[in-house]
Amino acid sequence: MCGIVGYIGNRQAAPILLDGLSKLEYRGYDSAGIAVYNGSEIGMEKAKGRLKVLSELTHDGATLPGTMGIGHTRWATHGSPSDTNAHPHFNQNQSIVVVHNGIIENYLKLKKRLERKGYNFVSETDTEVIAHLLDYYYDGNPLRAVTKIMHRMEGSYALGLIFKDHPDELYAVRKDSPLIVGRTDGGSIIASDVPAVLKYTRDVYFIENEEIVRLKEDSMEFFTVDEEPIEKESVRIEWDVNAAEKGGYEHFMLKEMNEQPKAVTDTFSPRIKNDQIVIEELGMSDEDMQRIDKIMIVACGSAYHTGVTSKYIFEDLARIPVEVDLASEFRYRRPILSDRTLVIVISQSGETADTLAALRESKKQGARVLGIVNVVGSSIAREADNVMYTWAGPEIAVATTKAYSAQLIALYLLAMKFACARGQMGEELLREMLSDLRALPSQIEMLLNNKGKIQRFANRYLAARDVFFIGRGVDYAISLEGSLKLKEISYIHSEAYAAGELKHGTISLIEEGTLVAAVLTQKELYKKTLSNMVEVSTRGAFVLAVTNEGNTEVERAADYVIYIPETNKYFTNSLAIIPLQLFGYYIAVGRGCDVDKPRNLAKSVTVE
């Protein structure tokens, strides 16, 4: 989970590298480094901590002159954060330098072999193995050395490589970690993700697995692992450059929360035509959808929570069995799939390693795979049988908000489409639901405008040690995400429970002053959850309730109530999550936490 950049051209490389890394810092921020080749020597600077430490150390790149270089911002996997473990890494005579995103799974075996051949290691990283392995196989031909190490390394990697003997060439390699390249005015650039290159180019090439790129100031060539040249076509990136900037907001997370109405609109609008749901990218006829006898939803983190929500909706609305799996567990339980199974894999980045592995396992077993992703050209988008994009735009904050909301919309549409195709939904109900769907953006905006009230409430709980979220049905799924938002950015211990499970142990943790957030948006479950609220209240808990307008009965059991507008019962997650996002955000801000870059977390989880 790291970010890499590289540049070769007619401009000074270091400022471009630092600028690119600043756009990738969400991918890792415990250390950073750059290496720049000035034609005679490769200069390097590395620093533990945030990128600003490196920028200050190099005077914004001025101390490292040269027109070719590579850079890296790190999220530690092998070796603790330190100057020594930070990338880039040299070979012994400093003639080859490497940056790496991913994990080399057989690095210990390779390291022992290299040590027996006299190579000395100075870091604890798996990446240094790559530098020494390249040195071992290098015979003056960089391409040949690269292909040889690719045949010997196991795991995932995106690499940026400089060979001192070749001052006019920059190499990039990919296997199971994201990598893009592009032509700029007077040069070529590589990066882990689109935001790093938007300032310099909008036409990029997505590098496929086991492909190699040789970049020069005025050209780029692509090769297979067998050194065979290949042709590739560029993809035009249509993002607004400003979408990847803060735009006057204090944090990216706050900006992205406020972009949710647009993300929701952009995701559903192209797929509703003449009061019908049209999902052309699904690639399935009504007969295909009728043939499916099971849906499996596979995801991690917040994306998994959207899957939990949609299980209730798919099964109730379309009457089709649904299983929801954590991607990190999916492969290891020997899932039973067939050609009548639809596997839906969900990932904001489209690069989540566990989810990508689940996709491949599903295809191996003959299941049809639909990817729901936010990044065009990402690995999941390319490898899934079909892909449904969530048009949320770039999401920079580590804690997802607008991508989560867009994923919910995609799943609502899919569930409704399946319900129609399978004869479970009539025209009247469809029109009613589409009307409610279209109303969501303005309702979300109204809730966002109520942030002052949420902030005042959050300020009362800055010193909280434990917070519990409870709900039933869809409300349980909302609770899962509300709890995650709070814990990942504020570092307060928080857990979510199906409300009916409280009495099976969890209620013993409730004591005087404990905050319990109860979500009640499903009318048929109001009374059940109200009784659970009374149970915790009588044991001293302070109860925050999130419920629908008009459900004033909840005020008898809650100390503080947040009302959400009336909507279809299947869509309540899209509204109830907004005050919970704001609550987590203002708690974190009040506690002085780095909201956009919470400790130990990174945006794109490209390792298992």
Image (tube, helix red, strand yellow):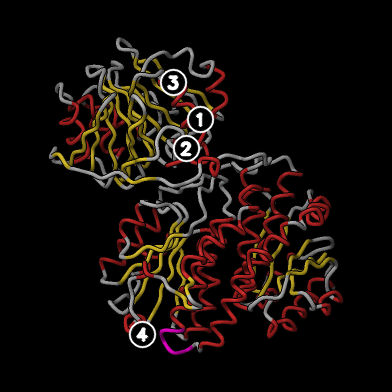
Circles 1 and 2 in contact, beta carbons < 8 Å:
yes
Residue under numbered circle 4: 290
Dot 4 or dot 2, earlier in sequence: 2
Residue under numbered circle 2: 76
Looking at the rendered image, the quarter that the N terminus falls into is: top left
What's the CA distance linking mark 4 and mark 2? 46 Å
Residue under numbered circle 1: 31
Residue drawn at x 61%, y 50% is 256
Residue 255 in percent (x, y) is at: 64, 47
What's the CA distance linking mark 2 and mark 3? 23 Å
Of residues 312 and 468, which is closer to you in this image? Answer: 312
Q: Which residues are magenta?
A: 420-424
Label 1 amino acid? Answer: Ser
Residue drawn at x 69%, y 50% is 585
Circles 3 and 1 in contact, beta carbons < 8 Å:
no
What's the CA distance linking mark 3 and mark 1? 16 Å
Dot 3 or dot 1, earlier in sequence: 3
Residue drawn at x 22%, y 39% is 150
